[in-house]
Image (cartoon, helix red, strand yellow):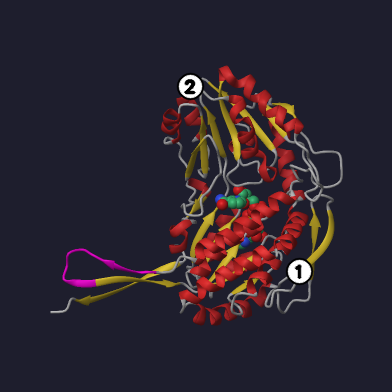
Amino acid sequence: MEVTRPRRAAAGSGERFAVLDPATGEAFDEAPDQRPEGLDAVVDRAHEAWRGWRTDSVQRTKALTAAADAVEAAGADLARLLTREQGKPLSESYAEIARTAARLRYFAELAPRVQPITDGRPVHSEIRWRSLGPVAAIVPWNFPLQLASAKIAPALAAGNTVVVKPSPFTPLATRLLGSVMSTALPEDVLTVVTGREPLGARLASHPGIRHVTFTGSVPTGRAVARSAAASLARVTLELGGNDAAVLLDDVDVEGIADRLFWAAFRNCGQVCMAVKRVYVPARLYADVVEALAHRAKSTVVGAGLAPGSRLGPVNNAPQLARVERRTAQALADGARAVTGGSRLDRPGYFFAPTILADVPPGSPVVTEEQFGPVLPVLPYRSVDEAVEAANGTRFGLGGSVWGTDLDAAEAVAGRLECGTAWINHHAELSLAQPFAGIKDSGVGVAGGPWGFHGNLRPFVVHRPEEA
Ligand code: NAD
């Protein structure tokens, strides 16, 4: 497929910045460094395009469905580029692109409906859901396409236009996504801007933006909320997680070990709702540590484009340094690296898949988000103690409970303080479900009809009933 450039991306800036391959640590391409001053023109055009796009939901359904077709047709190019700049194994990039297309199709079928209000009064009242205007989508580097589409698809389906800003660590696949989707969309309905800070901050505070939908870390989420306060734009924040998996006494350790391991290590552990802590009954502790360590040792770590790699590099040098710091701190706190524990001695940002035992519960690898291939395993004596520990961080994204008696597991799952709880698996999401972290994990609701309505405002009309 020929790679076309986004029609409106990064207009007005001749500067570019290097994009690194995390498997080598070396630059392999570059992206336009949009200057924040250029955002006025980008947002103005998005506003102009909104006037037409918001009027016809049938046209939107057709265009978004065609955009999904175009994404699938470009799957091979998108997947290679995504793996190159993000680091994940190629098969995971293909899976990400499949989910991106599926999300476009799901939201293409949603259209704002007129909703009558019935309250017994002799007045006919109805809600006519209306779009907001240009939406800013600010995206992190762990799932650049999937998370961009989670913002683009509901916003466009609702009749808004979108300006996407990917992470400077992963700008290229999103640029290509923008140009591929734009072949099916009217001009300026979707724009991708790439660049370094303060581009995100300026986009979030731009007076022409009516909704800022952000996924990323908690500190940046707070900064985005402050920026958006300038224009009082609506804000949706999907932030960090520190999900606990609680294993119950009747768990089938060998039966669940693969699923549990990959729930923690998929995408090199760089998943907001990865399993980031495992709580195990003391009686089963040695068995679970051994089962997970066995899998960590036998996982093939390598470049995402190398055949057979199951685990790629960490995406970028600052993140690798963070993973190293958290791990070193845990070891200094008295934890034991059953396997792994350090970066691998080779070029690129590779860190050995690591299982930590005997971790003090107050160590930052337990209380904070490690966001890398490192998993602390902690013993507990009573289920109450495990639930309290699972709920004992400032995060509240997801959690899971693992056991053979599903009713007992569900009862424990119901006690987790988070947005989504799973039984015997983790981080499986339906396109039709709401996705909403609590505490520091987020503000607002994404996903399903709730995420769609997060991109609409109610306009209410009252009129007396006919005499
Ligand atoms: P990050 O917060 O550093 O950056 C996210 C995005 O914000 C990037 O595009 C970045 O360039 C931009 N940005 C940076 N400073 C900004 C500012 N002042 N104003 C506006 N935008 C700014 O996050 P990251 O390191 O790219 O991603 C990892 C984090 O994302 C982890 O904490 C992870 O848990 C979180 N995450 C959350 C979810 C979720 O759905 N809850 C999903 C994936 C990742």
Q: State which tag comes first along the sequence, 2 or 1.
A: 1
Residue bearing the label numbered 2? 382
Q: Is residue 226 visible?
A: no
x, y (%) of residue 66? Answer: 59, 70
For ligand 1, the image quadrant comes to bottom right
The residue pinned by badge 1 equals: 1
Q: Is mark 2 within 8 Å of ligand 1?
A: no
How far across and how far down the image is residue 75, in percent? Answer: 70, 61
- The amino acid marked with disc number 2 is Ser
Considering the numbered disc 1 on the image, is that residue within a helix, a strand or a loop?
A: loop
Between 36 and 400, the one lying in front of the other is 400
Badge number at residue 400:
none
Query: For the residue marked with disc 1, what is the amino acid?
Result: Met
Q: Is residue 443 above or below residue 358?
A: below
Q: Report whether 402 appears left or right of 193.
A: left
Horizontal and vertical percent position of residue 331: 72, 29
Magenta span of residues: 113-124
Q: In this rendered view, identify the residue nearer to me: 215 or 292.
A: 292
Q: Nearer the viewer, residue 318 or 113?
A: 113
